[in-house]
Image (tube, rainbow, N blue to C red):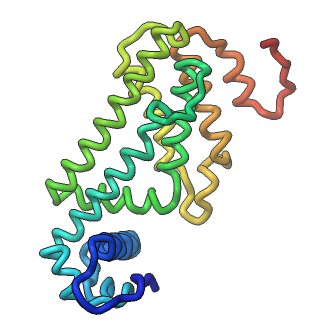
Amino acid sequence: MSSVSERRTGRPTTAESIALRQAILDETLRALRNAGSERLSIDRVAAQIDVTKRTIYRHFKSKAGLIDAVVTREIDRLTVAVSGPEESPDRPVNGALAELQLWSRLIFDHMNRAEERAFRRYLQFEAQSDPEIRDHLDRWYLKLFDHGCRLVGAAQNEGSIGPGKPPRLTSLLFDLVFGSEARWLFKNPSVALGGDDADTYFRLRWLAFLSLTGHHAWGEFVREMAPDAPRERTAG
């Protein structure tokens, strides 16, 4: 059971109110992942964090408002999580291509965490009938795509990727790397169909992207696709 910090009498402080709101959102998110919106019980959420249902409705006017607040917060978190190394003071200085690879792997790892996959599937299901969730998702995917286009363009400017429209090349990268959603086994979420682990899955698709976008030898990708064959060490 989640629990809110010990209460005192009187009006809650701003910090206590913020902490309670976050606890409500955290427990609602957990419930949505497990049961979806149709079976979401406000009574159960209240019981799990040891507050009354009335307390929840003081913070969120309705069940729909609570769900929307959870979705908004999680979309914001996703945006920060996948904004990538561009805003990070610790980002590598190995060039735009290295930054694009790091960003792609960051998103790949984030989007393939079991809890993130579960919540994304919930959002995609709810978006079919909820225009607000559709808008949230669309804005997030567009922001993600625009960021990818900027990184691809930077890699082109340094000569690491061949010419082509950045949106088309970014779409190709997304299809290769982020198409993993349909490949992970439910009973063993660390292994994809075909038996590849996450590292192998990402590496093969990154090499395919480099091979298809020019300036990179197709042979390296072919050797990776046949891991039992002897490999020649290349200089550099």
In the picture, which quadrant includes the C terminus?
top right
Taking the image as shown, residue 196 lies to the left or right of residue 206, namely right
Question: Where residue 66 sits in the image (x, y, percent)?
Answer: 22, 70
Instruction: Inspect this view and state whether residue 28 appears.
Output: no
The residue drawn where x is 53% and y is 41% is 106
Count of marks overlaid on the render: 0
Relative to 120, does residue 66 appear above or below in the rendering?
below
Q: Residue, x 51% and y 13% (percent of image)?
A: 161
Q: Position of residue 49 (x, y in %)?
A: 37, 85
Q: Is residue 123 above or below residue 136?
A: below
Depth check: give the residue in front, 39 or 70.
Answer: 70
Residue 72 sits in quarter: bottom left
Q: Residue at x 40, y 45 (%)?
A: 80
Nearer-the-camera pick, 14 or 49: 14
Q: Position of residue 189 (x, y in %)?
A: 58, 59
Q: Is residue 202 left or right of residue 8?
A: right
Asked if residue 210 is positioned above or below residue 48 in the image, the reply reads: above
Q: Quadrant of residue 123?
A: bottom left
Image location (x, y in percent) of residue 201: 62, 40
Whether residue 208 can be seen here:
yes
Q: Residue at x 16, y 68 (%)?
A: 65
Residue 233, above or below 59:
above
